Amino acid sequence: MSAPAPRPRRKIAKYLGLTPFALYVLLFLAIPTTLAVVTGFFTEDGDFTFSNLLGIFDPVILRTFFSSFWLSAVSAVVGAIVGALLCFAMIGTRAEGALRTVVDSASSVLAQFGGVMLAFAFIATVGNQGLITVALRDIFDLNIFENGQWLYQVPGLLLPYIYFQVPLMVITFMPAMEGLKIQWAEANATLGGSRWTYWTRIAAPVLAPSFFGSLLLLFANAFSSYATAAALISQGAQIVPLQIRSALVSETVLGRENMAGALALGMIVVMVVVMWGYSVLQKRTARWQR
Amino acid sequence: MTSSTASAVRPAIGTGATVELKGVIKEYAGQRALNGIDLTIAPGEFIALLGPSGCGKTTALRALSGLESVDGGTIHIDGTNVVDVPVNRRDIGMVFQSYSLFPHMTSLENVEFGLRMRKVATADRKARALEALEMVGLSDKGHRYAHQLSGGQQQRVALARALVTRPRVLLLDEPLSALDAKVRVQLRDEIRRIQTDLGITTLFVTHDQEEALAVADRVAVMREGQIEQIGSPEELYTSPATPFVANFVGLSNRVPGELVDRMVSVHGEQLAVVGKTQANGAVIAFIRPEDVVFDSTGIEATVVGSSFLGSLRRTQVQLSDGALISIQHGVRTQPTVGERVHIRFAGHPVSVGPRS
Amino acid sequence: MSGQSRIGAAPSNTLRWVILGVVGLIFAIPIVSMIEFTFRAGLSGGYTLDHWTGLFAEDAARTYRNLFTAIGNSLLLAVVTVAIVLVVLLPTMILVHLQFPRLRRVLEFICIIPITVPAVVLVVGLAPVYSVVVKLLGGSVWTLAFAYGITVLPYAYRAIQSNLDSVDVVTLSEASRSLGASWLHVSWLVLLPNLRRGILAAAFISVAVVLGEFTIASLLNRVNLQTALLQVSQSDPYVAVIFSLLALALAFALLLLIGRLGSTDRNRSTSL
């Protein structure tokens, strides 16, 4: 840009162009996030306190964190493996072809916009009168609810969670699969390697950072998910987001005010750690994709 | 070549394999990418496959490697038909155009890979890999990853990797096309030197005719799935068998003339004709720029442009009938635009083609 | 690309279709269950079309008044959210891309934050902000769009940015400026037509996100499609499931359109 420096008036005008967005983000992202993180440190009367934070270590709350971790981890691992398998199945198909576009769109819908509707889907499938429940009962004489109403508790959440984790994995991991250069497979073949050696010695190590990065993303996704759980579990606070619901709806939880803030802080800490890990692994992948 | 370790990489002379392609056919969606290719490569010979994109040269190479199946014909390596032998058992070495180094392995690990596949013991493997890297001048870069190497260095590692297992045949698929001009020239000479030292039968694919002529024992010009002509670089250049070869290899002036038996007359001069015979009558003669000279007794022309190319000059002149002729000459002569000059065709035999 | 499967880089056709078939079947089951459910005639068994035809009955508008209001709310929210994306985000992205290239990282970071800050956390801090908003602009539902604009940021940003990256916006604007165009002309005549693909993708994705949003609406006590669906499901589960299917189908169609948009533009540009 060899033009002379714009006059001060024009420069200010340019910066002014950024203010609507800056203001908007300040009001509806920066301030709410700060409030969410910070209210945990204050009582209703505005006094600084650690009691809300300490509430996190109450066994009840710890158990909800543990449940959230368990649910997120299991659904992430299953989702990652099945999702990776699907990506493998789609290698070599045309990126613009019918199969891919349908799978991509369906994955987007199920992964990101399902929420409440997925809850209905699973009630219709494995609820008391669900299609599968009834089929198993009538055809195989199998009562899947013999040991309790698990659908409306944490283990029951696993099914719908996996249902949206697998598509998310397909969306996030497919680019990595496509990044496998055909020349590597060809070089492996000309050097005397087999299908097995290609996948174990070349593709797997190269895909590993992406795979684990996607795994972390899936964990974060499940951990922060609210709608499906809220729809299936109308009253109850077995996982952290539901605990926040309790804290917001009734003003005190565990006899402490502003528990919601403390829980929010706890969630953000977990999310930041996980997303940081994800970005580290992403950088590794980018380095090889030159 | 006296040290015993050198022999670990260098096989005894004369162990290059014979390669024979007979009537090889390959079809893609009804089109024939290879339309009956016949090619015999002698042990230790360096053959270049040259042609425009789509001519089938890469397909022929990949058919030889096994990465493409063939729909007809045979491929013999040392007398055995390998058409049904899978890629990983053909004992070939291949260098790709780009991106072929495994990104998660160091150069040394990359080079070791083929030895690993052959279950060579670890210590032996490392030693041989290091020698291969030495052979390409990168013994100090063994610990580097592909993204830490320049394009030229990456291709050298790829070459070391392909050669370390002492394959019977070396295949190079446009290995220099993705590199800078200067690196390209350096590397092609190195490849030729190493190939000559090792005596390995080699097939080299390129679309750059200068590269092919500079580096190969014989060049095969391909077009639309067939070999138009195969011969030494000099043969191809001075005696092109068809107009396509005359046009593709080197620069040519296309000058209309009259053909009578084996002599063509252009602008009053008589020139002998080489290559495929044509019917008598109107033809186009292909005359090399260096075969046109400034001569006061020659045809009248006006200079319309002149380019300085470092070691030589190329000048364009226009004849009275409007035709443009390109002349290649030494830098001492410095024609100016608009100058009136006289030119002659220096009498070398030319190739002719139909005037359409 | 059978060559790929010969050397093991890609699965053989049978393996491919076995995997896709099995997983596809399993994933179809919940959808099929939903569809089957909507035809059930209650505990007595047997099937009926009544639940579907009931939507077109004369008094449908009255019976399902709340649901239809909620649908209207969600559509209104979708429109306002898309407006926010077009009026606030898009100009900022173009401005940064052209004039503040060094701020690009910052902008990208800001637009990725909503992924790290889940809606359920954001809403804890949104509640006090919204009490102010309600005082200023009233308590109607469209104000939720301010929060939705934030939740769609990552998706809209990515859609528009990939378009910005693929079209050389800098060169185009420099060329048109040198031909004498004002910034208004440049934006309207040169930039926006070339950003059509990204803008449409961002708009469609935003609509899909808004239609599926539950968390913020529910915890801020507003009524939108998803909260209404949950409520209706207590009294009339059939209608709830029918509308869920319709909403899912609509979102699927929108995203399919985005996919087709992307490919047709690509085909067009490669033919040049």
Image: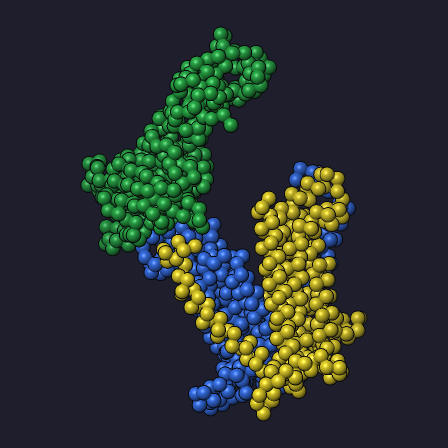
Could you tell me if residue B277 is visible in this image? Answer: yes
Q: Colour of chain B?
A: green
Name the quadrant containing residue A204.
Answer: bottom left
Image height check: is A35 above or below B292? Answer: below
Residue C159 image position (x, y, % from top left)? 62, 58
Could you tell me if residue A59 is visible in this image? Answer: no
Q: Quadrant of the N terminus of chain C?
A: bottom left
Name the quadrant containing residue C47.
Answer: bottom right
Residue B67 image position (x, y, % from top left)? 36, 50
Residue B239 image position (x, y, % from top left)? 38, 24
Name the residue rendered at 52%, 83% in the picture: A131
Near-viewer residue (B346 or B333): B346
Q: Colour of chain A?
A: blue
Name the residue rendered at 29%, 52% in the picture: B84
Name the residue rendered at 74%, 50% in the picture: C188
Relative placement, left or right, of A281 versus C133 is: left
Near-viewer residue (B29 or A158): B29
Near-viewer residue (C253 or B258): B258
Number of numbered markers: 0
Near-viewer residue (B179 or B323): B323
Residue C18 image position (x, y, % from top left)? 42, 68
Relative placement, left or right, of C139 versus A208 is: right
Relative placement, left or right, of B21 versus C267 is: left
Colouring chosen for the image of the structure? by chain
Q: Looking at the colours in the rendered structure, which chain would you say is drawn in yellow?
A: C
Q: Quadrant of the C terminus of chain C?
A: top right
Name the residue rendered at 33%, 32% in the picture: B218
Relative placement, left or right, of B160 versus C157 is: left
